Image (cartoon, grey):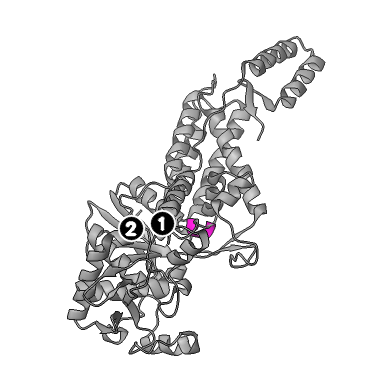
Amino acid sequence: MPIKLFNSMTRKKEIFKPLDPSLVRMYNCGLTVYDYAHIGNLRSYLTADLLKRWLEYRGFKVKRVQNWTDVGHLAGDTDVLAEDKMALAAKREKKTVWDIADFYIKAAIEDFKRMNFIDPDFRPRATDHIPEVIEMVEQLIKRGYAYVVNGSVYFDISKFKNYGKLSHNTINQLIAGAGGRVKKNPDKKNQLDFALWIADPQHVMRWESPWSVGYPGWHIECSVMVKKYLGDTIDIHTGGEDNIFPHHECEIAQSEAANGKPLARYWVHTKHLLVNNEKMSKSKGNFYTLRDLIAKGYDAKEFRYLLLSSHYRDNLNFTFKALDAAKNTVNSLIDFIDKIQGMKSKAPWNEKLHAIVIKTKLTFEERMDDDLDTPQALAAMHELVRETNKAIEEGTASEKNLREVYETMMAFDKVLGILKHEKTEVPAEIKDLVEKREVARKMKDFKTADAIRKEISAKGWIVEDTPNGPRIRKKQ
């Protein structure tokens, strides 16, 4: 079954066919590094991580780029009478903008590792690409798509006839919809024209250019980095749905006007993450980072599971009740994996359980092929766990069956990324108590056996009686 992705450009699912079958080129808009990544950012990055993992599972080689925006992203996502988010952070923390960028890039990489995101092939910083920005802006001016006013350079949206094609708006609709919401800039021919270069000799991050001392606009940076690392046309561009307009719309206009080729063949956008059915806001007290969740006793893989439990194109309502449920589920899955790994059994080969494994694998792959349907893929995996536990309880799961289930679960986890953990070593003291309890049980001294079980429990461990002998696990 071919992979199908929902393309935001066409608003329908399409069979994925890369331009070059030997290499999928993929770009996702990265973090503006003025603060910690919030949990909504992480949802968008998970989609990119999941997509890369699934493409590789299906045999594709993937080259993925995720940038750092460390200049030009203005407060309010505008380019009029607003401060750069990096400069605001520098004032807030009484550091240089360069220190701010370095600190939050390091923090983001730590968060991404906790989330078990596969590293992209490149993580370029916008500030390392100023010469390429100037070169592309010069190209746009030369081709008649951009104009210079008072040292700033603006993209003329009236010259790009397909402006609005990603957000499915015409230029007239966008102008009418903007109404009084857009701050007036007298330098612009049209108030929806956007800045490619902003003249500001006083800006804390500034460079010489043919037009002025200033800094690049937010949108041009991504166009430049896509071209440098992946070429004029890429296969997949991802981001959050809030990137569709204006960021990705502007990116398309710049890149296609400069290069004369389509920017991306598939646009994959992740829906919003809400908190208690509201948009995250520091003023409402419902704004969370991964570090906040960890401080409350949660693990990143539990949050990752919560994200996977909802389709990326559905809004996800984050609650701590839902996170608690995810925590319990992940612990249960890890417990299952630890249980079946190396489990001894004298049962013969179970053809029925083998058939369930094959069916589960097919269902999992079908659901993931269908626009990364993780909720249904997880449901298939949980059904395999239930059927395997049932066979274990009945004493009908052979060691070969259990190895097959374990290997299948590990194959799924190469995509899902939720089962990685350090196996807890059982202390010698607990092992001794379990052995004493077994002796008591064999002698039918159940009073002593129960007392030892309680002692084991008081020390933070659980002993389970199975057809294949006692099993010990740490309390969660």
Q: Is residue 352 left or right of residue 285?
A: left
Q: Is residue 142 above or below residue 433?
A: below
Residue 201 in the image: state x and y as whole percent: 33, 74
What's the magenta bit mostly, secondary-structure-wise?
Answer: helix
Query: Dot 1: what SS?
Result: helix
Residue position for label 1: 101
Say which of 146 and 17 sits in front.
146
41 inside magenta stretch: yes
Disc 1 residue type (three-letter): Ala
Say which of 144 and 209 sits in front.
209
Asked if marks 1 and 2 touch (Cβ < 8 Å), the reply is yes
Q: Is residue 377 left or right of residue 167?
A: right
Kindly tell me whether residue 73 is visible in this rendering.
yes
Kindly tell me whether residue 10 is visible in this rendering.
no
Which quadrant of the structure image shows residue 269? bottom left
Q: Which residues are magenta?
A: 39-43
| The disc label shown at residue 290, or none | none
Which quadrant of the structure image shows residue 227? bottom left
Q: Residues within 10 Å of mark 1 (few under 14, many from 20)?
A: many
Which quadrant of the structure image shows residue 428? top right
